[in-house]
Amino acid sequence: MADLAPVLLDATDLLDPPALDAPPAPSAAPASPVDPCTEAELCPDPGVPDAAARARALLARHPVVDGLNGLAWELRLRSGHELSPSRFDLDTGEGGVHTDIPRLRAGHVAAQFWSVSVPEVVTGDRAVSVTLEQIEFVHALIRAYPDALRLTLTADDMIEARRRGRIASLLAAGGGQCIDSSLGALRALFQLGVRRMALAEGRNTPWADASADEPRAGGLTLFGEEVIREMNRIGMLVDLSGSSAATMRRAIAISKAPVVFSHSAARALTDHPANVPDDVLDRMAARGGVCMVTFEAEYVCPDGEGTATVRDVADHLDHVRAVTGPDHVGLGASYDTGGVGRPMGLEDASGYPRLITELVERGWPESDLAKLTWQNALRVMRDTEFTARATQHRRAPSTVTIGRLDG
């Protein structure tokens, strides 16, 4: 795990991985490993007429960081909740799911956030215990495929995993019910490897409103604000996918680190309650965050229904980039999360080259595509780590309770 000494950088140093080679401040840890993906290496030759070939060439140098994959829970359901990953064959292909190692390789996925979320109906201490079981399962899954997967805790780990030819595997918790309103539980999840948590998905938590539920907290309660401060302090990404618009706006205002949307889309194009309004996209970008656009049909179809296409996903990526700029858009396909459908051509984890081909044909600059696939997610990880280092010098672990703050 990275040294927690403070690191002071100029804001421009955080925009591009190559700048991380600059000498650190005297009190900082040794310089981070060099990111193999630098702007100087942008690969596709503008003279190559074939968009698909250009997309494949770019992905070979700037592979995908995907924001959400629910394979762990899907495998648990298929096994009758037996936690042994030996029941599955992800090496040669696993039927009935969207994700396995050959398809991740074909899709040029170099880093994957694996969900350790539990169904929204599971609450209280049961939600904590089931989340712990999911964390145990994902750790076992990574150990079962050491030639393909590598546990990842930091931005440097992402780079190292890629150098070794492994898929960087990060853990992401969805829905704040997984901590049962306990900051101690939040810290325990971080110690077990969880590097991102969604505040509210599907249903409200006692301290944060979800987009699909009746508002109760007015966005965030005082304890919800404390959860975000503690996430900033330990270095856990604040995920606003599934939160209400009021929760989104308040969380962005409170957080000292960039926030992310792990699997959302643009509400201006599809009026889904979980999609992100333009004013929130503006606020997110101003604070350095990233909106990772989902492939789920109900989020990206123009009317929220019907069969989605690669073009629908590309339209949402176009819109987010137009509103926020190229530094604040990413990919969060949401494979194996139980959604109602995936776009034609993006039915499984091998489909990313088709989407990048569509964006090449739309005239996306090569530098913007590199940010979309790899650089933006890496930068947000680094920014969050830097915020944690600085915050830990000013703030001790919070021990307040929801009863004390919210009554």
Image (cartoon, rainbow, N blue to C red):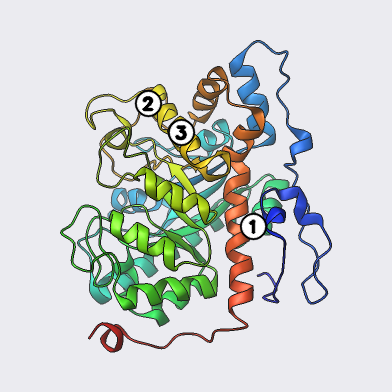
Going from the N terminus, do you reach mark 3 or mark 1 first?
1
Disc on the earlier residue, 1 or 2: 1
**In the rendered structure, which disc, 2 or 3, sits on the residue that comes first in sequence?**
2
Q: Quadrant of the N terminus?
A: bottom right
Query: Measuring 66% from the left and 50% from the top, which residue is drawn there?
Result: 15
| Side of 246 relative to 361 (left or right) | left
On screen, residue 319 versus residue 38, left or right, reads left
- Indicate left or right for 291 with 380 as reference: left
Q: Amino acid at mark 2?
A: Asp
Q: Quadrant of residue 110?
A: top right
Is 7 left, or right, of 317 in this rendering? right
Q: Which residue is mark 3?
A: 317
Query: Which of the numbered marks, if any, corresponds to residue 155?
Result: 1
SS assignment at label 3? helix
Rendered image: mark on residue 312 = 2
Mark 2 element type? helix
- Of residue 356 and residue 351, the one placed in the foreground of this image is 356
Residue type beneath disc 1: Ala
> Most extreme residue toward the top, as rendered?
49
Camera-side residue of 227 and 84: 227
Label 1 sits on a secondary structure element that is helix
